[in-house]
Image (cartoon, helix red, strand yellow):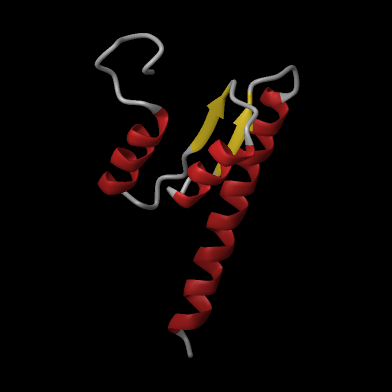
Amino acid sequence: MDGIEKNAMNGIETLDKIKDFNPDIPVVMLSSQDKIDVAVSCMHHRAFDYVVKSETSFLRLQKNITAFFHYQKIEKELDWYMSRM
């Protein structure tokens, strides 16, 4: 976002705002920066994943969406079992 407008938030700031609003929202960071330190920083800021823009990034995003819903289902099942203990 900060590449479009001078006063816009960068990706990490946007991620932090989303997580402050609702920490349960899964955020996948999509970037052209293929740098490990940027990816690690995003993960420390609670990103669900970090995807570098490429020819295969759409497939990676599809896998992330599937994984998120799978995790969500497992969490619901775990909560159900834990409530019966």
Residue sitting nearer the eye, 39 or 49? 39
Please give left or right for residue 52 compared with residue 10 in the image.
Answer: right
Which residue is at 58% across, 56% downward? 71
Q: Residue at x 74, y 17 (%)?
A: 55
Whole-percent x, y for residue 77 in the image: 55, 69
Residue nearest the viewer, comparing 3 with 18: 3
Position in image of residue 17 (x %, y %): 29, 39
Residue 40, given in percent of the width and then of the height, sits at 56, 46
Residue farthest bottom in this picture: 85
From the viewer's perspective, is residue 63 above or below residue 81?
Answer: above
| Image quarter (top left, top right, bottom left or bottom right) of the N terminus | top left
Figure check: 26 above or below 3: below
In this view, which residue lies farthest toward the top? 4
* Left or right of 69, for residue 18: left
Displayed quadrant of residue 83:
bottom left
- Depth order, front residue of 4/22: 4
The residue sitting at 48% across, 82% down in the picture is 82
The relative height of residue 47 versus residue 5 in the rendered view (above or below) is below
Locate residue 5: give its quadrant: top left
